[in-house]
Structure formats: C-alpha cells, structure tokens
Amino acid sequence: MISFIAQRIAKAIVVLLALVVLNFFLIRLAPGDPALVMAGEAGAGDQIFLAQLREKFGLDQPLPVQLFLYVKGILSLDLGFSFRQQMPVATLILQRLPATLLLTGTAFAISLAFGIVFGALAARFAGTWADTAITVLALVFYATPLFWVALMAILLFSVTMDWLPSFGYETVGANYTGLAHVLDVAAHLILPATTIGLFFMATYARMTRASMLEVNRLDFVKTARAKGLSDTVIQRRHVLRNALLPVVTLAGLQAGTLVGGAVLTETVFAWPGIGRLMYEALLQRDYNLLLGVFVVCSAMVLAFNLITDLVYRSVDPRIEFAS
Amino acid sequence: MSKRKILVSFAVLCMLSTAAVAEGPKAGGVVNAVIQPEPPSLMVGLVQNGPTQMVAGNIYEGLLRYSPKLDPLPGLAESWTVSEDGKIYTFKLVKGATWHDGKPFTSADVLFSIDFLKQTHPRARGNLVQLDKVEAPDESTVVFTLKQPFGPFIGIFEVGSLPMIPKHIYEGTDFKTNPANNTPVGTGPFMFKEWQKGSFIRLVKNPNYHVKGKPNIDEIYWHVIPDAAARSVAYETGKVDVLPGGSVENFDVPRLSKLKNTCVTGAGWEFFSPHSWLWLNNRAGPTANKKFRQALMFAIDRNMAKDVVWNGLGKVATGPSGSAIKYYTGAVPKYDYDPAKAKALLKEAGYNGEKLRMLPLPYGETWQRWAEMVRQNLQDVGVNVEMVATDVPGWNQKVSEWDYDIAFTYLYQYGDPALGVGRNYISSQIAKGSPFNNVEGYSNPEIDKLFADGAVAFPDAAREEIYAKAQKILVEDVPVAWMLELQFPTITRCSVKNLVTTGIGVNDGFRDAWIEK
C-alpha cells in the first residue's frame, strides 16, 4: 500500500506541473492585462505609468522567460508575489483557505450525511409519498441556481425574520472570544453552508436511491432474505454498503472541487474565502495569484483522488491496490 | 410688546435653542460603510483607484480641500497667496500637524511629496508640468513657482490628486516595495488600524488631529461585500449605515431611499463630475463621418435613459464639459431626441447598413441595460448595431487598442477643463495602449490650440472666452457622443450627519461627520 501511495504521489507531481504550464498559457489567452486593469481603475494612466506597472508585474519579459521563472518558483514551493495586493501569493491563499475549508467542509458533511439518509429512506419506501416528496425536493434543489437559493435564503432568514446574519464570516467589531466566537461564526456559517449543501445533498440522495434500488434486485439480497434476516439489517448491511460505491465516487470528485467550487456562494454571502479570491484575481488578471489558487486547487483534487481510492477499499474490501 | 409678540418670540427662542441642541456635533460612535470593490492598497500615492481614494482620503490629506463650488478650502495649508502675475503660489502650512506616528509634518514633506508623486502618480505628473520649482523657505512655508501662469493650478491640491507623503518613511527606499505601504501613515483624521482582506478595513480616530475637536467619530469599518444585492441587504438589515455612491445597483436606489430613517444625496461629486459618453471611432467606418456622428446624437433618447436607467439622477450632458466644471457654457448647438432628423442625417452621410460593434461598460447591470437601450434607439433609425460582451480587462484592452466602433465610458473631470476635459480631445493625447486619452482619435488643430492656450491664459476671463469657443466647436463636431452627467447617490442613515460637505464627497467626508444618538 505504501508503494501504491508513493507511486500515486509521484504521478500527481508530474500532473501538477503539466497543469501549471497549461494554466499559465490559458490565463494569458484572455484579453487584457493587470496593468491596464489598474490604470483603468485609477481613471488615468499615461504611458510611463503603464510601463512601470508592466515592469513591476514582470510583463515586460518574453512569455517563455515568464514561464521559466514561474515554474522555477513553483519547484521551490514559491507561489510568487501578487503585485496588486502587495503580498506573497502563499500568504494570501493561506489567509483565505481556512474560511473556505470550513464552509465547504461543513457543506460537504451536511450534504453527504443527509443525502445518504434521504436517499436510503426514499429507496426503502420507494413508490410511497415519502419517496415522491424526497425525489421532488431533490430535483428542485438540484435544478435551482445556487445564487438564487442564496438570495432567497437571505431574504427569508435575514431580511424578513432577522434570525441569521446575511454576510461575512463573523460579526465585525464585536471581538467575541471563546464559545461566543464559535457560535458567532456558526451563525454566519448556516446560510452559506446550507445553500451549497442543498445542491450536493440532492445529487447524493438521488444517487443513493437509484443505487440501492438496483442492489435490492440482486441475488445476494434474496439470499439474505431467505436466511431470514430482518429487513433493516438487510438494507443497512447488505444493500446500503454495496450501494455506496457510486456515491463514494461522486463524493470523491466533488471533494476535489471543495476548494474552488464555492465562488458564487462566497460572493453572495461575502464569505472571505478562496473562491472569491480566485474570481477577483481573474477579473483583475492578477496572474500570479490566479495561478497560485489553481495550483492549490489542483493539488487538492489530486489529493482527494488518492483519498477516494483509499476509501473505496475500506468500503469494499474486494477492491485491491493495483501497482 | 404685546402678549402675542412675547409668545411668538418665546416660541422662536425655544425653536432656536432646541435646534442648537440638535445641531451640535456629538463625539463618539462607529460608522459601518461599504467599500466596493476591495481596494488593492491604501497607499494613495501609488494607487489611485476609486475605492483606494475613498478609504485613504480619511488617512492622508492634501494641502487644500474644495467646496461644492470648487473653491479652495484650507487643508494642510491654512492660507495661501497667488502673485499678481499668476506664477508664484505661496502656502502657509498648518501648525502642529503630525504624522500618525508622531513625527511633525513640515514643508520638507511637501517637497518630498512632489518628487514622489512625479514618479508614481500619472495625474499629478500631468498636473505639475508647468511647475518650474518648489521651495521651502522655512518649516511652514512652501513656494511653488510656475513657468507660466497655469489657471487650474489652484485646483490640483486635493488629497487624491496630490496627497502628502511622509518623507521620513519613504525617503531613500524603493517606494513600491516599502513595507509601510501595507500600514499607511498619513496626517488625516483617521488612522489605519486593521485590514482583514476580503472582510473589512478598520480605521480609528486620530487623537492628535490638527483640527481641534475633530474628528467626532471613533471608528470606521469599511465592509467588503462583493455582491450588489448583498450590499443592499446589508443596509436593509442595519449592518451598514453608509452606501457610498455606486455601491448598489441603480434600480435598488428608489427602494432603499424609501426605507425609514434613510437620507439620500447626490452631492459630493462636483469635483469629479463623472461625465459619460460613447467613444466613437473617428478613424474608420461610418463613425468617421461627422454627419453620422451627429445623427447618433439625435437618435439617442438621453432623457429617457436618465429617467429609466438612472432613475432620474444626473443630467443630460450638453457637451464636453459638465455643468459643475469651470467655464462651462450651455450656449452650444443642441441635440434633442429627434429620430426623423437622425434618419435624414444618416441618409446624407451615405450610411448603408454596415454593422457597428458596440462595447457596453462591464460595470454591472445598469450599464448593460443602458447599452441595450441605446442599441434599441439606434436600431429604430436603421443603424445596425452588434453588442460585444467583455469583462473589465477585455474592455480596457479593446478600447485602448481602438478595436471598437462605439464604446461606453465615463471619465472624471477634476473641476477644470485643462485637467479633465482637454485630454479627451487634443491630438497630442492620441496614443495606443491607454483607455484614458483621446481614444476616439479626434484631431483638430484649432482645438489643440484652444486647449493649449486655455491652460495658460491669464486672467480667468481670458480662459472663459477660449473654453466657450472650444466647447462650441466640439459640440458641432461630435468627436464622441455625450450622454449624461452622472450622479452616484450616497445613501446613509439620517443619523449620520454632516457626511458630505465638500466637492469630493465621501472621499474626505468623515472628518466632519458625526452620529446622532
């Protein structure tokens, strides 16, 4: 197993470098550069000013030289400097990463837990009103755009009922500590995490339901019934466990997008996370910062792929590590 | 005195006294404001974008401030004199002003700031071209000597245009990488305290501020909320008290204005006077034809755009200068909405249905809707328009490389035609690569001469005559299609008093502001 992991990590590094090069060129295909954006925001910019900015951003160098310098930096674990924000890219990302992981991690946990439970219930009571209700709700949440759900949630819970805060990560200026701080952050977390969670919950629920219904028809389930096991035991130990494999696949794929996948939600709720950082870097053509976020996201995806493979094995011992 | 008279005067006295009690500024309190988008830096000597100026205007100061009528007011300079020939400006600095780190502010800082800004600040560089030398005979006196009289000179000392930079922090360092850029030090009424990127910027009262008894407010939080709808909600739910101009979509303004305890003002933009127009490519295509450009002016219903898209805020522009700008004249050819006349002119121009590429300004819904409306206007008279969608960097590039036929924009005018108007029309400003010069490619030797003369004519009456002539010629030629003098409303709780007091509005507003409890 150790050699399996080592091999995978080695492959991951090669993939990561390829991604860096690819992203480097992809970003530069977009029209406009950071110097023009900054001059634009200032509402003024003579040629000297633009030349100064381009020199600062390193844009006066030929493209291959820029790429070489960037890859060299990455190899020494240096993500570069964001001239726009006047900070090292790594610092900016590390500042924002915890907020995003808290948000998407919570959303992921909510969606997986409730998704599997609702999916299992729907399958168990297939054809009844409970099944219909769960299926319809899942479809609605899956089909509704996230930002709209977010705005409606704000309208209902913040504006109308005034139960939950509508923006931010914590109450600014309140200086809570200890438990009060935890509760404050939790209150801010509920709306955005639920918004993302609802969407993914719907996919998990539908996947679990379909998968369980399929497993239910298989011969070993009939055998279990013939042995006289109780229905609950059959569903839980025989059906659900086997039905979970496709859900794990899906969850593994989605876990990879946890870092960068919350752009809309973070924007609507003014959550100081990495999705927004990436979006703003894109709008401002802050190349180093954007590439930095891409690198971190790619690394996360690769890491989660590896974890997913490991989880497969614990869910289904028949799967072996092929070297 | 009759009984009745006594009663009346008593009542008046009562009213006066309660008014006096209610009017008195109170110390203390916290203001929550919105900043949009998040500024890249607060070092206003290096970065001049809108949000930077808005926050940094509380931290840094200029030598002068400007009233809504654009008359100079004391800032870091308490008095000033201009020599009779208009070439020597002598400033007396306020006594007892200190930097936020306790070091005194002196004339040496002023000299240093001029050097600093010449290297880093494109607008200051342009404003200072007529400067021959600047000297400091003593600690609190600064003398500017000009090569020749330069009318707008008294108008360049506002904090965003010529902020004072601390010499003791920047001298001998690489300005752009100085670590102090992240912890700005100024002389202003508020000091930088904390910046949680992506969340908020916190400023606190400067206890040693050189104006006695000011500021009144203890703390300002600038909240970073990226979504326009979320910004309105933050105001509605009482989490923020101040929405500076442009922080919510225009269609939300009427709804927010009706909320309880809400005050709205369009004041505070006199100095900038954001002026919007359509860049028309004067080099090629149908827009190169003057008749075609005039036809566009007649075809576009600008009153309706003002009423529908901008909720009645702002004014229909009559020409290159906004009406708050010095030497503005309304005595120019008029272009009222007249589709029939537009059609006739199109025919005269020989337009035969070529497709024109129109770039909306990618600054949100309002601009998108405005572009759609103009497209409709143009289609109504038979002009074939195709909308080109871009994001902000793409827009900047397309406009600066002249890759468009019609493009929306708006620019600040800085109070004087020599500072913010001429740059859009004189031929020496035609240069690829910047979206803020003569992008349309208009070239007219007569106009070049008028703007060159206008900047240095003396006294002011001579300037007035020159600019009146220039405005008339430009309006006849229609190098660009002027649309509206924009007004970005500032929305506040009514309990935030005295916020907008000068011609640059919220950009230096919190110095005098106070909160009614």
Image (cartoon, coloured by chain):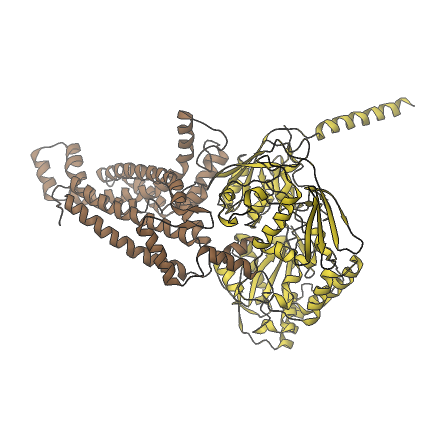
Residue found farthest to the front: B137
Query: Can you say whether A35 is above or below A215 in the image?
Result: below
Q: Quadrant of residue B125?
A: bottom right
Residue B450 percent coordinates (x, y): 72, 66
Q: Nearer the viewer, residue B121 or B382?
A: B121
Residue A21 percent coordinates (x, y): 32, 58
Q: Nearer the viewer, residue B131 or B205?
A: B131
Q: Nearer the viewer, residue A122 or B406?
A: B406
With A233 as the anchor, is B166 left or right in this view? right
| Image quarter hosting the N terminus of chain B | top right
Residue B48 visible to an observer of this rendering: yes
Residue positioned 65% across, 73% down in the render? B291
Give the colour chain A carries in the figure.
brown
Residue positioned 52% across, 59% down in the render? A50
Residue B284 percent coordinates (x, y): 56, 73
Query: Can you say whether B399 is above or below B157 in the image?
Result: below
Q: How many marks?
A: 0
Residue positioned 10% across, 36% down in the render? A225
| Image quarter hosting the C terminus of chain B | top right
Query: Can you say whether B378 is above or below B116 in the image?
Result: below
Q: Quadrant of residue A148?
A: top left
Query: Can you say whether B428 is above or below B228 in the image?
Result: below
Residue A212 visible to an observer of this rendering: no
Residue A10 percent coordinates (x, y): 21, 50
**Quick one: which chain is yellow?**
B
With B257 as the anchor, is A209 left or right in this view? left
With B408 as the anchor, is A321 left or right in this view? left
Q: Nearer the viewer, residue A188 or B63?
A: B63
